[in-house]
Image: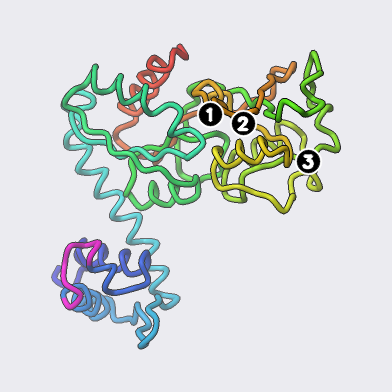
Amino acid sequence: MSHLPTLKQLKYLCAVETYQHFGKAAISCFVSQSTLSAGIMELEEKLGVTLVERTSRSVRLTPIGRDIFQRSRVILAATDDLVVAAKAGSEPFSTEMRLGVIPTIAPFVLPQILKSVRKSYPDFTLFIREDLSHDLLSGLRAGRLDVLLLALPYPAEEVAVSHLFNDELVLVFDKRNSLSKLKKLKVKDLMGKNILLLEDGHCLRDHSVSACKIGAEQANLPFQATSLNTIVQMVASDIGISILPKMAVDAKILQGTSVLSRQFDEPEVQRSIGLMWRKNSPRQEEFEALGRLICKSLNKC
């Protein structure tokens, strides 16, 4: 069976595709560049194909190399699941867990969640990765992350999801804005208004557009932000109005500004918050237990 690739070789190939650089890939694998390069060449010899195009300026995978990379990623993730399954007979939260969280959730709920985790399971190690949904999903598929806390729905294949709770979307505006005079706020009241949203890539943008029926001409302003804190400052400058998660407002993101918030007089203006994990993960029961712990720590159950 010496002709079969090793997991280490597959890991080296995945690192090269991820970093597009032999030096950086080697660092991520905690080996020297020469060791990683030799491992890639051994893999090519075993498979009888060229996997990597090497030039003086760039490193990229060949078409067959990309196919092998996709298959390798699945194999490595399954191997991680195998190791976890071997430990699954022990008590829940007895091993480490890698949790991915999107930026429009992380700063507003993690303090309560982590406090509850430390209190209930002092020996449990929860690693946190904050990133956009697309990048978190890539990490989940590659086995770098075990479970994601994000806004649903989010398009993904071969995953399981668990709805935890709904988070209202609220309108925020400067106190000088005419909307402050409304006694009841309806989605139709946003027609024709300049609405500031996060830049493309943030799922809150898509959820806000859908829930509030925001037209393309309202959402495509030349002013876009990468964080909710920046959005708040832009609203405070009366550049426009915006849509924020209620969890952010409850966490006092508006404190010290001239920005006011108003809830919609319509129940469907909200987003679903939930967990996502690989469909065949052996830790499903543990992830479901994490979901219950999250809801309890946030008083959502």
Mark 2, other Cα within 10 Å: few <14 / some 14–19 / many ≥20: many
* Residue drawn at the location 65% of the way across and 49% of the way down: 224
Which residue bears the numbered disc 3? 194
Query: Which numbered dot is residue 244?
Result: 2
Query: Which numbered dot is residue 98?
Result: none
Kindly report the distance in space between the C-alpha atoms of the residues bearing marks 3 and 1: 21 Å
Mark 1 / mark 2, whichever is N-terminal: 2
Mark 2 / mark 3, whichever is N-terminal: 3
Q: Tell me where residue 233 appears, x and y as whole percent.
A: 61, 39
Position of 142 relative to 1 (above/below): above
Q: Tell me where residue 263 appears, x and y as whole percent.
A: 68, 19
Residue type marked 2: Leu
Residue 124: name its quadrant: top left
Kindly report the distance in space between the C-alpha atoms of the residues bearing marks 2 and 3: 15 Å
* Residue drawn at the location 68% of the way across and 25% of the way down: 269
Task: Please state the extent of the stretch shown in magenta in the rendering.
Answer: 27-34
**86 falls in the magenta region:** no
Position of 275 relative to 11 (above/below): above
